[in-house]
Amino acid sequence: MAVVALSELLGTAVYSSTGSRCGRVHEVAITPGEDRARITSFVVKTKAGERIVTASSIVAADPYGLHTTLPQSQWTSLNGGEGLLLLERDLLDQQIIDVHGRKVVRVNDADIVLEPENSHIGLKVTAVDVGTRGIVRRLLKGLVPAELLRRITQKFGSKVIPWEFVDLIETDPARRVKLRISHDRLAKLHPADIADIIEELAPAEREAVIETLDEGVAAEALEELDPKMQVSIVSSMDSEKAADIVEEMDPDAAADLLGDLSPEQSQEILEEMDPAEREEVSELLQHEENTAAGRMNTEYLALSPRATVADAGQMLRTYEGDISSVSTIFLVSDDWKLAGAIPLSRIVAAQPSTPLSELAGEGVIFCTSECNEKEVASLFDKYNLLTLPVVDSEGRLTGIITADDVISLLRKYAE
């Protein structure tokens, strides 16, 4: 098994079935729709113009060039190269997402493996070079003999990313719509890691990455970004796509984002949202941002004091929100006045038939909707809270503020 660099293949002589040198490699192509790693063809520059030579016709590869079983008369025209990922054009010097390392890097070269396959040579991209070796190889190519260049580059440490961990950032979806490489691995990262990656990109690239993500994942990543960057990304989307993502955000985060947009953009997105989500977010938009009501989340779990532990378990099982953010179940009277709070840890340890009223403590820490942000932060600090309920002037539960909200708040003041 031999390994050759992409930069070494580019410019290599190509010989026809007659043994005549008929051109040089101008591009190396993959057909992502068929196989994201296997090289399927070469674009060869000849006197008659650019021609396609299929990789399956390559029977030998040596330092002097590639040898094909096809006569030059059977080398076809490029015809635009639709459906092809051209490695020099679309890969070299491009930014890629290294999902394994959770960062953005620039491609300097690529490693290609050559293996005998039946009657021909099979070629596959196995890794991208993001280190100094690839840069030196490309800078010195043509200036020093190939063998000397190999010896020089071997002195530099290898810094590569396996091809399977590579996601291309597509800044021009219109041109590459059929060439997209799956972002499945990117979507499996923690939203905070995705946000870190997005922050490293140029504006057009940020939008391209967000567009490829599932709406739920995009929403979680968007919530981790700086508000100004959120506005920049959402402003570039059409209102329907933006609404799909905003609907998946926590209502308080969605309201904050829409409040930072222009009134026209905000209204367009609201009109595209489902009625239930639109009503919830619109209500939050009525509150001042620097108050508890402006910071609160309207997604929470509440039951009557007459409910049992079994009722609480059923509610948890059917809850459609982010269950990982739930730390407390609140007790409310028939007119929705706050009557108590129970940490989930108490519910887990109790018998199913136990009334929730028996698990509630002597009183509950809360704030009113008009409390300012500093008062909210002070309550979290003083009582070491995970969740703070927010009540209206009549004591009715209207929402909650979580520790994540307070962390975002403190980050804002730190800046």
Image: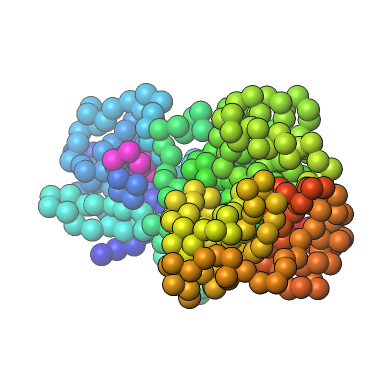
Give how far across and how far down residue 310 sits, in percent.
44, 62
Q: Quadrant of the C terminus?
A: bottom right
Magenta residue check for 66: no
Magenta residue check for 31: yes
Q: 342 or 335, which is in the foreground?
A: 335
**Residue at horizontal 29%, vertical 52%?**
123
**Residue at horizontal 17%, vertical 54%?**
117
Could you tell me if residue 52 is visible in this image? Answer: yes
Could you tell me if residue 93 is visible in this image? Answer: no
Asked if residue 254 lies left or right of residue 154, the reply is: right
Q: 267 or 390, which is in the foreground?
A: 390
Which of the colour schemes (rainbow, by chain, secondary structure, one colour) is used?
rainbow
Give how far across and how far down residue 166 sits, in percent.
45, 54
Q: How many marks?
A: 0
The vertical placement of 75 against 410, above or below, is above
Q: 55 or 207, which is in the foreground?
A: 207
**Residue at horizontal 28%, vertical 27%?**
76
Asked if residue 287 lies left or right of residue 398, the reply is: right
- Majority secondary structure of the magenta segment? strand
Give how far across and how far down residue 260 sits, in percent.
78, 38
Which of the 4 image quadrants contains residue 84?
top left
**Residue at horizontal 49%, vertical 51%?**
319
The vertical placement of 335 against 328, above or below, is above
Give how far across and how far down residue 25 sits, in percent.
38, 42
Which of the 4 image quadrants contains residue 162?
bottom left
The magenta stretch is 24-34
Q: Quadrant of the N terminus?
A: bottom left
